[in-house]
Amino acid sequence: MYQASVPVALQALERALVLLGHATPQMLNARLHPQMFNCAEQFEITAGFARRATFPLIGREVVEADSVLDRDSLRGHLQNTYAEIAALTPEDFVGAEDRRITHRAGFADLEQSAQDYLQHFAIPNLWFHLSMAFAILRAEGAPVGKAEFDGLHAYPPGFSWVE
């Protein structure tokens, strides 16, 4: 369970920090839709899901942080979350696969095996909220692409799939 959760959460947090570096205060307040979270909130929720993708698996409570949603506070929040998760060891996860995780998904009360919780809830939501932050930045004109999103892709300067 360590390998399926910790490296994934750390990669998402690393990418969030890269993307956040491209955000202006105006971009952090932008939304894709009036009824959706703004960009700053998407980054904050990304950090929350990084904790939710790891801590419940080891029986550790997820405490939601109260953070001010400006760029410096978000950076500190993401960095602190990264440090907390990076401190976890494979030994912390011994027996994790036998856990049942009780949690809320919106207004739904759920109980899932640790495997189902991680694969079908925590990891998809982690990447969903990071994707929403990325989409907002992109829609607001930030110079970000897949390379900034996943840290794996590379494209030549000025490349576009659309002519």
Image (tube, rainbow, N blue to C red):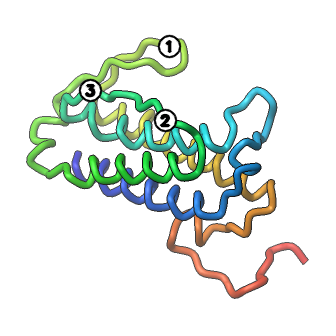
Give the number of the mark in front: 2 or 1.
2
Q: Does residue 41 sit above or below 162 in this rendering? A: above
Q: In which image quadrant can residue 64 be found? A: top left
Mark 1, other Cα within 10 Å: few <14 / some 14–19 / many ≥20: few
Which of the two discs, 2 and 3, labels the residue nearer the N terminus?
Answer: 3
**Disc 1 designates what residue?**
108
Q: Residue at x 50, y 43 (%)?
A: 46
Q: Position of residue 22 (x, y in %)?
A: 65, 63
Query: Which residue is at a point 86% across and 73% down the rendered structure image?
Result: 162
- Identified by mark 3, the residue type is Glu
* The label number, if any, that marks residue 67 in the structure image: 2
- Lower sequence index among marks 1 and 3: 3
**Residue 145, horizontal then vertical, whole percent:** 67, 68
Tell me the element at label 3: loop
Which amino acid, mark 2? Ser
Q: Give the Cα separation between the discs numbered 2 and 3.
A: 18 Å
Instruction: State the CA–CA distance, disc 1 to disc 3.
Output: 19 Å
Q: Measuring from the top left, give residue 31's x and y in whole percent.
A: 76, 40
Quadrant position of residue 8 = bottom left
